[in-house]
Image: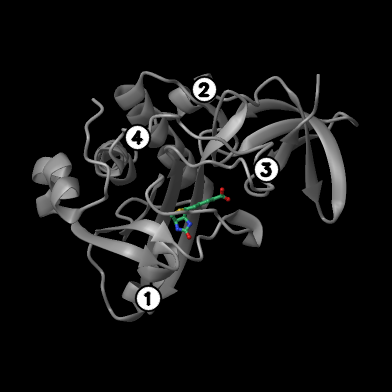
Amino acid sequence: MIKKELALSKEALCRHLGELCAEIDVCVHDRIDSTNTEAKRMIARGHDRLSLIAAEEQSGGRGRMGRSFYSPGGTGAYFSILYRPTVPVDTAVTVTCAASVAVLRAIRTLTGKTCGIKWVNDLYLDQKKVCGILTECQSLGDSTYVIVGIGINISTSFEKTELSPIAGSLGFPRLSPSELIAAVTRELLPMLKSPDSAWLEEYRCCSCVLGKRISYLQNGEMREALALAIDGNGALIVRCDDGREERLFSGEISLKMQ
Ligand code: BTN
């Protein structure tokens, strides 16, 4: 449901999280460099509780491949979930796929819109990227931590930026960031706790990549292939033009014009 609660607040976030609030530490910042970087600082300070770190604005939002993530105030949902895995995390790709499905479900529930997922971490609406996910793993002593950083453009305007051909927004300026962040968190936490990955079928159904020709960079070489399937870990299986099949665990793919 769309409400008039436009500023991010801890009070609203906790209200939307309901009883989940008892098991997760919630930290809300007006402005911060990056919620993922803040999660790393928390780990370094010895914090090891399940945490949700959210910000109204990020001055140094980070994306994959060393890119930045445009995070102006009052127009998006920028947050990270910090947790210690209780089920084995084979690859960060699985966590990123789970987060994609959680965001997809939350957006569908709150706006009625269904996004397409571009492997591995981007959600698209009307051919424009509306959400990016950055999963990072961190070790300290014997402990492993996972940070799932999610940025959703609720009403961000890219008009005067170089991102305008590729980036877009949900187009719901009255959607509360607190409600959206809580909805994603409520979807994602059970997936992170369970070894069951039945949600991968939903990921496959909403993939805008399967069956398409793609290109990707491997060992410094640009390759072209057909995207065949997504395996049980979330890896992308492709058939190269020379007939070989490859399994991609990371990196970035581009869709070829058909
Ligand atoms: C990408 O598109 O390459 C991933 C973008 C991830 C952005 C989110 S916003 C919240 C969290 N904090 C960051 O600095 N990055 C992630």
Identify the image quadrant of residue 255: top right
Q: Nearer the viewer, mark 4 or mark 3?
A: 3
Camera-side residue of 57 and 40:
57
Residue at image point 24% right, 38% down: 179
What's the residue type where badge 3 is placed?
Leu
* Mark 3 lies on residue: 248
**Mark 4 near mark 1, Cβ–Cβ under 8 Å?**
no
Q: Nearer the viewer, mark 2 or mark 3?
A: 2
What's the residue type where badge 1 is placed?
Arg
Camera-side residue of 189 and 127:
127
Mark nearer the N terminus (1 vs 3): 1
Q: Position of residue 217 (x, y in %)?
A: 79, 48
- Residue occupying the far right of the picture: 242
Residue 100 horizontal side relative to residue 218, left or right: left
* Mark 1 lies on residue: 41
Mark nearer the N terminus (1 vs 2): 1
Q: Dot 3 lies on which element?
A: strand
Q: Dot 2 lies on which element?
A: loop
Residue 28 horizontal side relative to residue 195, left or right: left
What's the residue type where badge 4 is placed?
Asp
Mark nearer the N terminus (4 vs 1): 1
* Mark 2 lies on residue: 206
Q: CA distance from mark 4 to mark 2?
A: 19 Å
Q: Residues within 10 Å of mark 3 (few under 14, many from 20)?
A: some
Mark nearer the N terminus (4 vs 3): 4
